[in-house]
Image (cartoon, rainbow, N blue to C red):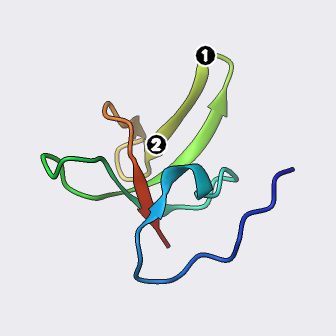
Amino acid sequence: MTEHPEPEFGKWQPIETAPKDGTPVIVVPAGGEYNASIAFWQDGSAGSVWIIPETNRYLTVEPTHWMP
């Protein structure tokens, strides 16, 4: 298991440091074309994806940053 430094609240973090344990976080893709979303990471047999809890759908654009 990879340990990550404690996140700084209110600051965008690189997506590589986001929790991958099902914890919901705020994610955003680069470029400003898309809104921030609440999502959690899910590992699956078909691959790993970011899931939006409200709709249970995966993000179609890979996020680049996250915050708690």
Q: Secondary structure at mark 1?
A: loop
The extreme right residue here reads: 1
The residue located at (40%, 82%) in the rendering is: 10
**Residue 12 image position (x, y, % from top left):** 41, 69
- Please, is residue 48 above or below residue 2 in the view? above
The residue located at (19%, 55%) in the rendering is: 35
| Disc 2 to disc 1, C-alpha distance | 14 Å
The residue located at (61%, 61%) in the rendering is: 23
Left or right of 31? Residue 62 is right
Q: Which residue is mark 2?
A: 51
The residue located at (68%, 77%) in the rendering is: 6
- Please, is residue 33 above or below residue 7 in the view? above
The extreme left residue here reads: 33
Sooner in the amino-acid sequence: mark 2 or mark 1? 1
Specify the label residue 46 is tagged with.
1
**Residue 33 image position (x, y, % from top left):** 12, 46
Q: In the depicted view, which residue is nearer to us: 56 or 39?
A: 39
User: Given the image, on which type of amino acid does mark 2 rest?
Assistant: Ile
**Residue 9 image position (x, y, % from top left):** 49, 83
Specify the label residue 33 is tagged with.
none
Q: Secondary structure at mark 2?
A: strand
Q: Residues within 10 Å of mark 1 (few under 14, many from 20)?
A: few
**Residue 65 image position (x, y, % from top left):** 41, 56
Quarter of the image for residue 4 reads: bottom right
